[in-house]
């Protein structure tokens, strides 16, 4: 009987696996409450290996934030490639709504925004990535400034509602205030 051969992951694949595990771990426990050992366990590797690849918890968290923001930018740019050079904000809103089914992604964003005020290096990266999202929306749409600002504000509110499980795959039973708030969205129809 032959033994199945194991496929070894490349360094890039292992790094991506660790970043995905970091997104989950940091989304659950935040920056302060997560250890590199927690991430290592989720990824099925040793803690020294995590440090060898990322040097510190801070750098691992920054990689997780870059991944989350990059994912949002990626889905926005995909909307543009499917709809032509310029897209409407409602096209981007539909793409963001699909991201609500990835609560870990949005959860790590919230923890990143909180950590930005406490850690200077994290803050610099978070502000840069938020700015890149703002610039991407400006580049992809012809929307006026006020509409883009409202789009970002609604996106932030949806991110918070997702973290509270008001919306998303694990949503709690809707209370009257939730129904009222969700019915008020004009840019994004949330079910």
Image (cartoon, rainbow, N blue to C red):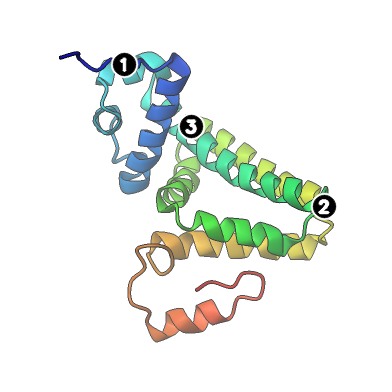
Q: For mark 2, give the secondary structure.
A: loop
What residue did someone put label 1 on?
49
Q: For mark 1, give the secondary structure.
A: helix
Q: Earlier in the sequence, mark 1 or mark 2?
A: 1
Q: CA distance from mark 3 to mark 2?
A: 30 Å
Q: Earlier in the sequence, mark 3 or mark 2?
A: 3
Q: Is there any visible trace of residue 152 in the rendered image?
A: no
Task: Tell me the tag on residue 73.
Answer: none
Q: Position of residue 72 (x, y in %)?
A: 59, 46
What residue did someone put label 3 on?
62
Residue 189 falls left or right of residue 164: right
> Crowding at label 2, few (<14), some or many (≥20) Cα neighbours within 10 Å?
some
Q: Looking at the image, do the residues carrying marks 3 and 1 touch, with CB atoms under 8 Å apart?
A: no
Residue 153, quarter of picture: bottom right
Against 55, is 134 above or below? below
Of 111 and 103, the residue lying toward us: 103
What residue did someone put label 2 on?
86
Quadrant where the N terminus is found in the figure? top left
Q: Position of residue 7 (x, y in %)?
A: 34, 17
Q: Looking at the image, do the residues carrying marks 3 and 2 touch, with CB atoms under 8 Å apart?
A: no
């Amino acid at each position: 009987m032959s033994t199945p051969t194991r496929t070894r992951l490349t360094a890039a694949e292992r790094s991506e696996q660790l970043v995905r595990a970091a997104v989950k771990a940091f989304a659950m426990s935040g920056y302060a409450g997560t250890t590199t050992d927690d991430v290592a366990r989720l990824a099925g590797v040793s803690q020294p290996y995590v440090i060898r690849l990322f040097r510190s918890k801070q750098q691992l968290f920054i990689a997780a934030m870059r991944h989350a923001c990059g994912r949002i930018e990626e889905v926005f740019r995909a909307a543009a490639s499917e709809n032509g050079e310029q897209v409407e904000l409602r096209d981007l809103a539909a793409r963001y709504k699909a991201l609500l089914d990835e609560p870990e992604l949005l959860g790590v964003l919230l923890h990143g925004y909180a950590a930005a005020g406490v850690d200077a290096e994290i803050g610099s990266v978070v502000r840069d990535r938020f700015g890149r999202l703002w610039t991407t929306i400006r580049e992809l749409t012809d929307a006026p400034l006020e509409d883009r600002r409202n789009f970002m504000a609604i996106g932030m509110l949806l991110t918070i509602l997702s973290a509270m499980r008001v919306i998303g795959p694990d949503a709690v039973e809707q209370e009257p205030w939730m129904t009222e708030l969700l019915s008020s969205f004009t840019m994004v129809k949330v079910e």
